[in-house]
Amino acid sequence: MKINGMAAGPLGTNCYIVHNGTDALIVDPGGDSDVMIKYLTEEKLNPRAILLTHAHFDHIGGVDRLRSYYDVSVYLHENEASWLENPEDNGSSLLLGSEIVTKPAEHQLNQGSMQIGTLSFEVIHTPGHSPGSVSFIFHDDKFVISGDVLFYQGVGRTDLPGGDINLLERSIRQSLYKLPDSYTVYPGHGPETTIGDEKQHNPFFPV
């Protein structure tokens, strides 16, 4: 299993391409879809799905182009099912000053194990930054894609609609911090970190 991150979209959101052999998953394509297509083409990868940790505008800007180009389905938690079509819910009209909208997701993300092609992972619901935030855990390779829940020495903001600081703390302490310390964390913004480092050094929710 390999993971490649690239900053994309108006806020430099981390988009990740996770691949095993030729099968690939696109996670949080915030924009700059041509850059992702170039990488996928050069690596001879076959995208099998687009996974969204949540539906804020800076994580969805490249969804429709990639969905159409590769004819793949989009997966999103049911709590944000309407956000892709609603610029007020996804924050683009408020924070960007222009509207980012996409077609609805084809599938809902449910908590538990998933298998798409040759790629297997666990979905956990980690609300707080937004009501439908999820994290993707790749246990075999000991890493988690945490979206905007847990960052390097930081956590996701909770002042947007649907944010809840108490839920965020519970998601981090009761879900992410329960992972082994050695697991690498790939966040929605900024550099990677580890569960162990955040438990020791995160100024918001230290252990």
Image (cartoon, grey):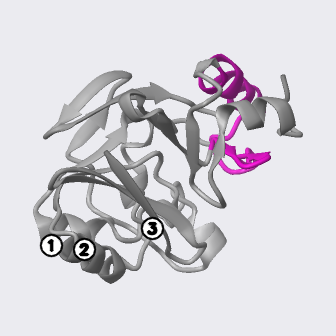
Per the rendered image, the range of residues in magenta is: 149-177
Identity of the residue drawn at 39% across and 49% down: 52
Q: Nearer the viewer, residue 37 or 56?
A: 37
- Position of residue 66 relative to residue 177, above or below, is below
Type of amino acid at the residue the image marks with label 1: Tyr
Identity of the residue drawn at 47% across and 47% down: 54
Residue on which disc 1 sits: 69
Residue on which disc 2 sits: 65
- Position of residue 146 relative to residue 41, above or below, is above
What mark, if any, has residue 199 been given in the picture? none
Q: Classify mark 2: residues with Cα within 10 Å, few (<14), some (14-19) or many (20+).
A: some
Identity of the residue drawn at 52% across and 54% down: 89
**Residue 38, x across and y down, in percent:** 27, 80
Cα–Cα span, label 2 and label 1 = 6 Å
Q: Are marks 2 and 1 in contact (CB under 8 Å)?
A: yes
Q: Is residue 106 left or right of residue 90?
A: left
**Residue 19, x across and y down, in percent:** 27, 52
Say which label, 3 or 1, has the lower sequence index.
Answer: 3
Q: Is residue 163 magenta?
A: yes
Q: Secondary structure at mark 2?
A: helix
**Residue 75, x across and y down, in percent:** 29, 44
Cα–Cα span, label 3 and label 2 = 11 Å
